């Protein structure tokens, strides 16, 4: 008799553990929200059906994010939610209310509670935008959980078959009579074969689990950079790239528009910048590393630029996706295309061409009043086209040999009492910063702008490791972290089997492991880390398809690094959610790297 009771107790323990595992639901939303609470209840949180309606408060039904969400529900479920007549028992409430507290400018709250309407609340339109993205994932999860028998819903560790095989060994013990927290009997959960599972297949209803999601980003700067100088990208793709950024709840698009190999933006006062600077006669074949002293070229002209009207259109499109576009006009180095167009702004009198080869070039702007007047003219034309408060001036890899060898520049340095060329670049940066400040803009530069003295108002983009960012925040400046060790998405994604890339190796796990706040700084200094950014340089990326291949899903990993709270990240757990999230990448027809999902 005791043996039989022991078997019953053993089964009860196994069964209880199985149930406990099933109710301890793990997160499947990506990027991971700050907080998810699962109320203890037997009832579904919300029943989505053909009778469900949708209402909007503080926004508009014609807002693109709302119309897109309604279309998403139709495509996922076949339901056309009513927006004209509200169903008081089954309504999705989308609310923007500036009086909601504790969510910040980009946060949101999703409430899915039994006997209540489904609510998405935010203090701003962009917070609602991010909340809707999370709700899309919840709806898709619910659909797959209902419709796919073998769907792994992130929480059930013990398969149904195993539980049934254990029940056959307990002398007809009726497990369905056990009452456990969260379930009245075994047939009331879709985790086990029973009545509700049959009903789910016959009734056109999606039972969304009860949950409360409270979410907001960790960092204010969550960015991606795309270089369109080395290889020009068409307007339609720039819009798609913005879509991909927005899909990942990122909010900054750093647009690298000028470099040695091409000038890509119309400046009406200086038409030669696009007449000459946007065109190169041909491009290096193969890898720059192996070019040697006798490089070979493809003989194919490469050209392209964006008109100011096209840029306005793109900026407006980005605004609707809550993306801030930050233009980069590189100076004083990386200016061969500029100097080829207007030689008077160059330091050397030698004729310059738009470069056909990669690498760091000798050309550098002349730091004279004439040049600064030219730079102000550029900023005057661009300041309203790009409404962002930020303007990136590059400042990286400026070879100063021409300054050292120029008698004119050496005389200028004596006049200004500047002792070395690094300090001269600091002077250059300071002059440009004053121009930008005059027009309400904040200067961002790569970490070389620290050399020779850091301007007190400059924001440092730390790319040569983390040292630049650390130096900046310790000096009281702000910094954006984008080190080559983790954030350069033009690097190889595996040791073998990959298309040509610039070099290095940054796989998905490396990106996911990154922590934007470096060690060795205090809390006050850490508060000046604005966030992080992934970079896609295009020397070896000729097409939009390859941009997507190099960027995704590394961008997906970065999205969680910059959105979610700091923790010891579990890469395998992330991969599970990534494979679920893959549906949304497919939905947007993104040419991601498939091997990263294996």
Image (cartoon, rainbow, N blue to C red):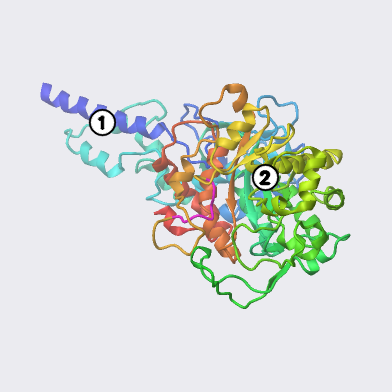
Label 1: which secondary element: helix
**How far apart in space, not on screen, are marks 2 and 1 (Cα)?**
50 Å
Residues shaded magenta: 487-493
> Where 329 falls versus 119 (above or below)?
below
Q: Residue 433, located in which quarter of the rendered image? A: top right
The quarter of the rendered structure image containing the C terminus is bottom left
The residue that disc 1 covers is 14
Label 2: which secondary element: strand
Q: Is residue 490 magenta?
A: yes
- For the point 80% across and 57% down, the residue is 345
Q: Is residue 62 magenta?
A: no
The quarter of the rendered structure image containing the N terminus is top left
Across and down, in percent, residue 582 comes to: 49, 53
Closer to the camera, 492 or 426?
A: 426
> Where 111 falls versus 50 (above or below)?
above
Closer to the camera, 365 or 55?
A: 365
Determine whether, in the image, residue 322 is placed left or right of residue 212. right
At label 1, counting other C-alpha atoms closer than 10 Å, the crowd grade (few under 14, some 14-19, many 20 or more) is: some
């Amino acid at each position: 008799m005791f043996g039989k009771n022991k078997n019953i107790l053993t089964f009860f323990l196994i069964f209880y553990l199985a149930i406990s595992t099933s109710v301890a639901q793990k997160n499947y939303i990506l990027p991971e929200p700050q907080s998810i609470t699962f109320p203890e209840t037997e009832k579904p949180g919300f029943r989505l059906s053909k009778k469900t309606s949708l209402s909007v408060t503080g926004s508009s039904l014609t807002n693109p994010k709302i119309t897109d969400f309604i279309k998403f529900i139709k495509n996922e479920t076949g339901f056309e939610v009513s927006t004209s007549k509200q169903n008081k028992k089954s309504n999705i409430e989308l609310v923007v209310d500036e009086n909601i507290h504790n969510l910040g400018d980009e946060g949101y709250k999703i409430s899915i509670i039994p006997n209540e309407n489904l609510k998405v609340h935010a203090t701003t339109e962009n917070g609602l935008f991010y909340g809707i993205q999370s709700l899309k994932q919840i709806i898709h999860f619910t659909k797959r959980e209902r419709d796919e028998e073998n769907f792994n819903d992130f929480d059930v560790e013990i398969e149904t078959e195993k539980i049934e095989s254990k029940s056959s060994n307990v002398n007809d013990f009726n497990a369905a009579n056990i009452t456990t927290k969260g379930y009245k009997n075994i047939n009331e959960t879709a985790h086990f074969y029973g009545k509700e599972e049959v009903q789910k297949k016959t009734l056109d209803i999606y039972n969304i689990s009860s949950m409360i999601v409270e979410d907001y980003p960790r960092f204010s700067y969550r960015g991606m950079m795309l270089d369109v100088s080395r290889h020009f990208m068409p307007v339609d793709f720039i819009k798609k790239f913005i879509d991909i950024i927005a899909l990942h709840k990122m909010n900054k698009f750093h647009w690298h528009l000028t470099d040695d190999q091409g000038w890509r933006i119309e400046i009406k006062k200086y038409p030669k910048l696009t007449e000459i600077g946007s065109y190169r006669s041909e491009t290096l074949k193969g890898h720059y590393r192996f070019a040697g002293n006798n490089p070979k070229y493809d003989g194919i002209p490469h050209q392209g630029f964006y008109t100011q009207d096209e840029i306005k259109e793109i900026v407006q499109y980005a605004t609707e996706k809550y993306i801030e576009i930050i233009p980069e006009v590189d100076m004083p180095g990386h200016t061969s295309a500029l100097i080829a167009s207007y030689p008077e702004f160059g330091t050397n009198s030698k004729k310059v061409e738009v470069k056909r080869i990669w690498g760091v070039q000798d050309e550098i702007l002349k730091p004279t009043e004439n040049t600064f007047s030219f730079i102000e003219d550029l900023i005057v034309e661009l300041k309203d086209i790009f409404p962002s408060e930020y303007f990136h001036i590059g400042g990286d890899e400026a070879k100063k040999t021409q300054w050292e060898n120029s008698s004119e520049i050496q005389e200028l340095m004596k006049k200004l009492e500047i002792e070395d060329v690094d300090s001269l670049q600091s002077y250059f940066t300071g002059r440009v910063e004053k121009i930008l400040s005059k027009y309400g803009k904040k200067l961002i530069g790569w970490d070389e702008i620290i050399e020779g003295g850091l301007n007190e108002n400059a924001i440092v983009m730390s790319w040569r490791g983390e040292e630049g960012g650390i130096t900046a925040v310790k000096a009281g400046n702000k910094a954006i972290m984008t080190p080559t060790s983790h954030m350069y998405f033009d690097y190889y994604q595996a040791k073998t089997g990959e298309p040509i890339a610039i070099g290095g190796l940054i796989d998905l796990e490396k990106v996911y492991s990154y922590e934007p706040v470096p060690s060795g700084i205090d809390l006050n200094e850490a508060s000046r880390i604005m966030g992080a950014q992934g970079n896609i340089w295009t020397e070896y990326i000729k097409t939009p398809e390859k941009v997507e291949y190099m960027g995704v899903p590394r961008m997906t990993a970065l999205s969680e690094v910059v959105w979610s709270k700091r923790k010891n990240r579990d890469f395998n757990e992330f991969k599970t959610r990534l494979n679920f999230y893959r549906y949304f990448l497919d939905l947007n027809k993104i040419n991601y790297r498939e091997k990263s999902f294996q």
